[in-house]
Amino acid sequence: QVQLVESGGGLVQAGGSLRLSCAASGNTFTNYTMGWFRQTPGREREFVAAISKKSNTYYADSVKGRFTITRSNAENTLFLQMDRLKPEDTAIYYCAAHPYLTALPIYRYWGQGTQVTVSS
């Protein structure tokens, strides 16, 4: 079992930045690929970024060059630095953990989500 708790969401103007954090507890953090997904009402959960156990990173085209995913294995924490935010980035952002890398929303463990709102 892995417990995930996100933080860092909020309201920001377009062009601004936010940094999301995801604190993990339970099973060994380094056993898992970690990912960020986002969801808006009436839409499917969407892949944002993932980082493998060896810290290889992958991004959705929509966020590439603006978002950066990192992990601190010493602190059991996942981060998402979001720069040059756009109104279309508005969503609930979820942290997730899975034994292997995938962009599909089939991750085994999920956090409760944190709201990000970008005003125009």
Image (cartoon, helix red, strand yellow):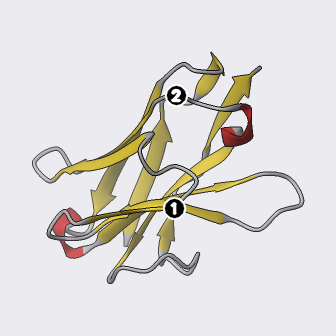
Q: Position of residue 110 (x, y in %)?
A: 52, 63
At label 2, counting other C-alpha atoms closer than 10 Å, the crowd grade (few under 14, some 14-19, many 20 or more) is some
**Is residue 57 visible from the viewing direction of this image?**
yes
The image shows residue 46, relative to residue 94, as above or below, that is below
The disc label shown at residue 60, or none: 1
Mark 2 or mark 1: which comes first in sequence? Answer: 1
Q: Nearer the viewer, residue 16 or 5?
A: 16
Residue placed furthest toward the right: 42
Residue at point 43% right, 54% down? 4
**In the image, what residue type sits under mark 1?**
Ala
Residue 22 visible in the current orientation: no
What residue sits right under mark 2 in the picture? 84
SS state under label 1: loop
Specify the label residue 10 is tagged with: none
- Image point 52% across, 28% down: which residue? 84
Which secondary structure lies at badge 2?
A: loop
104, 5: nearer the viewer: 104
Instruction: Give amino acid for label 2.
Output: Arg
The N terminus is located in which quarter? bottom left
Q: Residue at x 63, y 18 (%)?
A: 12
Residue at coordinates 83% horizontally, 62% vertically from top-left? 43
Q: Which part of the image, by quadrant, shows the C terminus?
A: top right
Up/down of 46 relative to 39, above or below? below
Few, some or many residues within 10 Å of mark 1 (<14, 14–19, 20+): some
- Kindly give the residue lying farthest to the left in the view shown: 74
Q: To which quarter of the image does residue 116 belong? A: top right
Residue 106 occupies which quadrant of the picture? bottom right
- In-image side of 46 versus 1 (left or right): right
Q: Determine the image quadrant of residue 89.
A: top right
**Considering depth in this image, is 84 or 89 the residue closer to the camera?**
84
C-alpha gap between disc 2 and disc 1: 15 Å
Residue 109 falls left or right of residue 74: right
